[in-house]
């Protein structure tokens, strides 16, 4: 049986603030190494590191920067305005995700302080100038900062999305045929359902037209709907329904004891008493052990490398 798609193809290409990988590019000549990125995620992804402040020639160490109330990027002393230089920087393409440095006036994703002309704080509704450009250019790109990745649920959701997006990029970068998109969609059925059941139906309509629509049109429509669906939160209830869906596909070949074990594990997860990894492991074990290809090949059961251990939280 083929390996799960998350292991076989689609290595994510992720943009990252250079300081988070340990590069000494911060204003004080230091770094902000994030060990989850460098020690756990790094073996499975390709990084695209970038420090916009270094790229516009500020060097290190350097004067700190801040956002004004009208979203200009200026030096703390107000002696220099770097907004135009930041706006001229090229944006990376072909990314499956981006991790930014939190609280940075260049790279922060949310809650960045903005200052009035007199130097007093105006609000905390700013977004880093470079981060805002990248997000505006690709609103469906999975984006997080390293601070939010300390939350187990947000970390799992981000990694799931970047691996899914990488698999889709791998498909569309190749010389795909209608049957290839149908196969991709079939493998992702349960994963999409866990995030957005209504979105799954919309995506299905695009797949149904794959044989009689231009490939570029199909790619654009499928990519947008797929990214939108995966961006929706996979709630505990939706996950439980997805687990039940897989169980329904394999239950006929199981004896009563094994069926009861799986049903009990799904219910325990639904009630918050067990992590998602428990029912997923049972379903995957039985699907593979009994040679049930449809269930075994569902990306929902292996959306990212198991070694990342991202589904063990309650």
Image: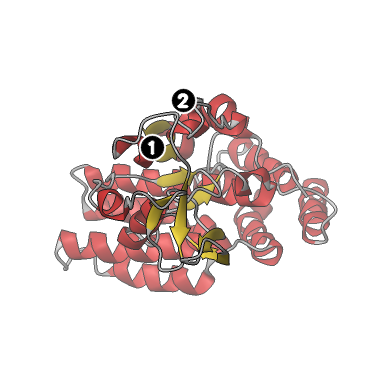
User: Front-most of 50 and 233?
Assistant: 50
CB contact under 8 Å: marks 2 and 1: yes
151 relative to 13 in the view: left or right: right
Residue that numbered label 2 is attached to? 23
For the residue carrying disc 1, how many other residues have a C-alpha within 10 Å: few (<14), some (14-19), or many (20+)? many
Whole-percent x, y for residue 99 in the image? 48, 44
Q: Earlier in the sequence, mark 2 or mark 1?
A: 2
Q: Give the residue displayed 61% in from the left and 29% down from the top.
A: 35
7 relative to 271 in the view: left or right: left
Label 2, secondary structure: give it: loop
Q: Which mark is residue 262?
A: none
Residue that numbered label 1 is attached to? 51
Count of all numbered marks drawn on residues in the image: 2
Give above or below for 314 relative to 30.
below
Between the residue at mark 2 and the residue at mark 1, the CA separation in whole angstroms equals 9 Å
Label 1, secondary structure: give it: loop
Whole-percent x, y for residue 172 in the image? 25, 48
Q: Give the residue displayed 68% in from the left and 46% down from the top.
A: 152
For the residue carrying disc 2, how many other residues have a C-alpha within 10 Å: few (<14), some (14-19), or many (20+)? some
User: Front-most of 227 and 184?
Assistant: 227
Res 239 → quadrant = bottom right
Q: Residue furthest left?
A: 214
Q: In this orientation, does residue 189 appear?
A: yes
User: Front-most of 46 and 264?
Assistant: 46
User: Front-most of 118 and 42?
Assistant: 118
Whole-percent x, y for residue 235 in the image? 66, 63
Q: Give the residue displayed 31% in from the left and 42% down from the top.
A: 170
- Chosen colour scheme: secondary structure
Whole-percent x, y for residue 295 in the image? 55, 48
Q: In this orientation, does residue 193 appear?
A: no
């Amino acid at each position: 049986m083929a390996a799960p798609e998350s292991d076989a193809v689609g290595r994510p290409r992720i943009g990252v603030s250079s300081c988070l990988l340990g590069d000494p590019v911060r204003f004080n000549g230091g770094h902000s190494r994030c060990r989850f990125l460098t020690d756990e995620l790094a073996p499975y992804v390709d990084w695209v590191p970038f420090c916009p402040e270094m790229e516009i020639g500020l060097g290190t160490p350097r004067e700190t920067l801040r956002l004004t109330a009208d979203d200009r990027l200026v030096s703390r002393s107000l002696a220099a305005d770097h907004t135009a230089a930041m706006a001229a920087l090229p944006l990376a393409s072909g990314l499956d995700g981006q991790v930014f440095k939190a609280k940075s006036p260049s790279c922060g994703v949310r809650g960045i302080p903005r200052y009035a002309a007199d130097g007093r704080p105006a609000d905390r509704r700013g977004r880093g100038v470079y981060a805002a450009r990248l997000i505006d250019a690709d609103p469906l790109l999975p984006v997080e900062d390293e601070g939010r990745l300390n939350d187990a649920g947000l970390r799992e959701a981000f990694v799931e999305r970047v691996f899914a997006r990488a698999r889709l990029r791998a498909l569309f970068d190749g010389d795909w045929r209608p049957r290839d998109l149908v196969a991709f969609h079939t493998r992702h059925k349960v994963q999409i359902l866990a995030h957005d059941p209504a979105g799954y139906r919309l995506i299905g309509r695009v797949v149904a037209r794959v044989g009689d629509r231009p490939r570029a049109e199909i790619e654009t429509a499928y990519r947008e709907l797929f990214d939108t669906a995966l961006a929706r939160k996979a709630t505990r209830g939706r996950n439980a329904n997805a687990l039940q869906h897989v169980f329904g596909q394999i239950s006929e070949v199981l004896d009563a004891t094994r069926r009861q074990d799986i049903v009990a594990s799904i219910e325990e997860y639904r009630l918050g008493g067990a992590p998602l990894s428990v029912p997923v492991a049972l379903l995957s074990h039985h699907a593979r052990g009994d040679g049930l290809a449809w269930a075994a090949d569902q990306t929902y059961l292996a959306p990212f490398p198991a070694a990342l251990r991202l589904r063990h939280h309650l």
